[in-house]
């Protein structure tokens, strides 16, 4: 599935953004700002237009405290509540039923994230889950893990096709799962053995700005029967597919991120879920894109940060940048609250079309007129 997603890499050219859009603005709705305490948001979902659930952890004096940050009034007010394990990601089927992935397993909520209970037989070391309905779901993660459930997560069985690629479990991660429709689905992963050197890192004459991206093995599992069977495929490529998102009609976007220095730090592709064709629609040397969002109208949004200096990737927060395109050709930077910064940012849409962004620096923004 999507063979040209890889072939298009060799045809890439720099695609620049246009002037800043002024009609709408991303305004800060929540900012965790307390002395000697920092909030990292790992995921944000809006089960309903009024209820939003962000999850992550507080860093206080070197100790991590898992928390959720919830609004019940469309972002006007937010409440911080403790969780029992550090959350990695969320998935909500509707306004009430949802699942939360942690390093130790999977938790479930039936009240929109107010309370959570652990699913006792769920696998550990997962990254994401995706549910087609209240019973049928899928989970992917590190150690070459991919599972499915037919009872809402009470029990899980391995997806046999996930073990077929000839890669080591320790270096293989399935990091993303999505469905185009009820029948067609896609699991992305990669195998990237660690670099080895005969000399210690402090003797390496190359600084981080000089280290170049290496190709690695990208893995895809696709299904055409609602997850009953999966077909694996592999390809050697630069970068990792970190996000794929589709509309019900098959239109989609895919995000490739490069972990070391490349021609540009990230790349966005237009995907066609029906034909498997793809084409590059955005890349820039001065923007690191970390998430993508495609609206039913065809409008697309990209969230990321600016590149400062020689380092494409830095653990230091930088200015948040959001771009929009109506046709996936012309990209315009949007007006963003000047206080917003991040290392990574997430784009989310509520069911009423309201758009949100969360940052790993404890900020949540809303797109407003």
Image: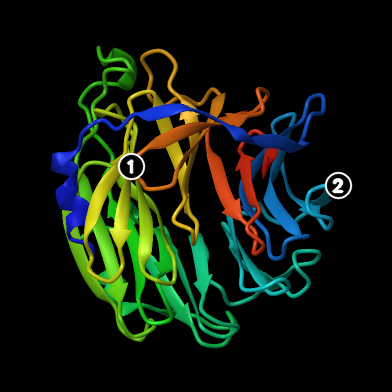
What numbered label is drawn on residue 329? Answer: 1
When asked about the image quadrant of residue 362, the answer is: top right
Percent coordinates x, y for residue 269 in the rendering: 31, 49
Task: Confirm or deny contact between disc 2 and disc 1 (CB under 8 A).
Answer: no
Using the image as rendered, state which of residue 262 and residue 16 is in the foreground: 16
Q: Residue shown at 60%/83% (left/top)?
A: 134
Seen in the picture, residue 210 relative to 256 is either above or below; the reply is above
Q: Secondary structure at mark 1?
A: loop
128 with respect to 80 (left or right): left
Q: Residue shown at 54%/83% (left/top)?
A: 155
Which residue has dot 2 on it?
Answer: 77
Visible in this render: residue 70?
Answer: yes
Percent coordinates x, y for residue 268 in the rendering: 34, 44
Using the image as rendered, state which of residue 150 and residue 280 is in the foreground: 280
52 with respect to 10 (left or right): right
Q: Residue shown at 21%/46% (left/top)?
A: 216
Percent coordinates x, y for residue 19 in the rendering: 46, 25
When asked about the image quadrant of residue 346, the answer is: top right
Q: Residue shown at 32%/21% (left/top)?
A: 201
Between tags 2 and 1, which lies in front?
1
Visible in this render: residue 165?
Answer: no
Percent coordinates x, y for residue 98 in the rendering: 66, 70
Q: CA distance from mark 2 to mark 1?
A: 37 Å
Q: Secondary structure at mark 2?
A: loop
């Amino acid at each position: 599935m999507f063979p040209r997603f890889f072939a298009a890499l060799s045809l890439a050219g720099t695609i620049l953004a246009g002037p800043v859009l002024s009609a709408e603005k991303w305004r800060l709705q929540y900012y965790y700002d307390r002395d000697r305490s920092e909030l990292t948001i790992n995921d944000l979902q809006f089960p309903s237009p009024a209820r939003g659930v962000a999850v992550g952890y507080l860093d206080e004096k070197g100790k991590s405290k898992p928390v959720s940050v919830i609004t019940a009034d469309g972002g006007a007010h937010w409440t911080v509540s403790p969780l029992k394990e550090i959350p990695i990601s969320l998935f909500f089927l509707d306004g009430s039923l949802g699942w939360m992935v942690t390093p130790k397993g999977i938790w479930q909520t039936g009240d929109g994230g107010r309370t959570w209970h652990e699913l006792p037989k769920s696998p550990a070391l997962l990254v994401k889950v995706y549910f087609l309905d209240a019973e049928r779901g899928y989970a992917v993660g590190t150690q070459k893990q991919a599972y499915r459930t037919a009872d809402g997560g009470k029990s899980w069985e391995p997806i046999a096709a996930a073990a077929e690629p000839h890669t080591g479990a320790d270096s293989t991660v399935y990091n993303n799962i999505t469905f185009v429709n009820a029948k067609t689905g896609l699991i992305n992963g990669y195998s990237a053995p660690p670099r080895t050197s005969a000399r210690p890192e402090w003797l390496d004459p190359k600084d981080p700005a000089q280290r170049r991206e290496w190709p690695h093995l990208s893995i895809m599992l696709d299904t055409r029967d609602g997850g009953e069977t999966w077909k694996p495929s592999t390809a050697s490529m630069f970068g990792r597919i970190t996000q794929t998102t589709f509309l019900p009609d098959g239109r989609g976007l895919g995000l490739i991120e490069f972990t070391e220095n490349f021609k540009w730090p990230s790349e966005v592709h237009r995907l066609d879920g029906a034909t498997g064709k793809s084409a590059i629609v955005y890349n820039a040397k001065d923007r690191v894109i970390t998430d993508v969002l495609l609206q039913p109208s065809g409008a697309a949004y990209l969230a990321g940060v600016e590149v400062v200096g020689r380092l494409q990737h830095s653990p230091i927060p930088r200015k948040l940048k959001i771009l929009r395109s109506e046709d996936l050709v012309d990209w315009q930077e949007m007006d963003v609250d000047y206080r917003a910064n991040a290392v990574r940012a997430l784009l989310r849409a509520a069911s009423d079309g309201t758009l949100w962004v969360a940052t790993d620096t404890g900020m949540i923004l809303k797109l407003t007129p």
